[in-house]
């Protein structure tokens, strides 16, 4: 069982589902909760850890977005 007490956008939940683990996430912000739910629903479970590692190695792109709190713009 994996517990995410500050779930945010659901990264821990995504990895838990990919590794076929049970997950409980806690998030106070409803906007983040919706983001996390969508992300977790879209994830496919891997059959084993080796399959997970192979998929991570083949998708090793880093994607970062920065948001301005004042202007809601993405940089």
Image (tube, rainbow, N blue to C red):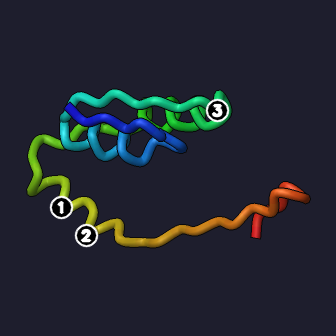
On the image, the x and y values in percent for residue 70 come to 89, 58
- What secondary structure is marked by label 2? helix
Q: Earlier in the sequence, mark 3 or mark 2?
A: 3
Distance from label 1 to label 2 (Cα)?
6 Å
Tell me if residue 26 comes above or below residue 57 in the rendering.
Answer: above
On the image, the x and y values in percent for residue 59 come to 35, 66
Residue receiving disc 3: 29
Q: Earlier in the sequence, mark 3 or mark 1?
A: 3
Judge left or right: residue 5 versus residue 33.
left
Q: Nearer the viewer, mark 3 or mark 2?
A: 3
On the image, the x and y values in percent for residue 32 come to 61, 37
Label drawn at residue 2: none
Judge left or right: residue 44 versus residue 63.
left
Residue receiving disc 1: 53
Q: Which of marks 3 and 1 is in front?
A: 3
Residue receiving disc 2: 57
Other-residue count near label 1 (Cα within 10 Å), few / some / many at <14 / 14–19 / ≥20:
few
- Which residue is located at x 53 percent, y 32 percent? 27
Quadrant into which the C terminus falls: bottom right
Judge left or right: residue 17 versus residue 38.
left
On the image, the x and y values in percent for residue 13 come to 36, 39
Distance from label 3 to label 2 (Cα)?
32 Å
Tell me if residue 66 comes above or below residue 8 in the rendering.
Answer: below
- Which residue is located at x 82 percent, y 57 percent? 69
Dot 1 and dot 2 residues touching (CB under 8 Å): yes
Distance from label 3 to label 1 (Cα)?
31 Å
């Amino acid at each position: 069982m994996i517990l995410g007490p500050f779930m945010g956008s659901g990264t821990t939940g995504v990895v838990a589902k990919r590794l076929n683990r049970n997950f409980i996430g806690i998030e106070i912000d409803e906007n983040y909760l919706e983001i996390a739910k969508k992300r977790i629903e879209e994830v496919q479970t891997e059959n084993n850890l080796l399959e997970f590692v192979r998929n991570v190695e083949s998708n090793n792109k880093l994607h970062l977005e920065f948001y301005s709190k004042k202007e809601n713009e993405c940089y």
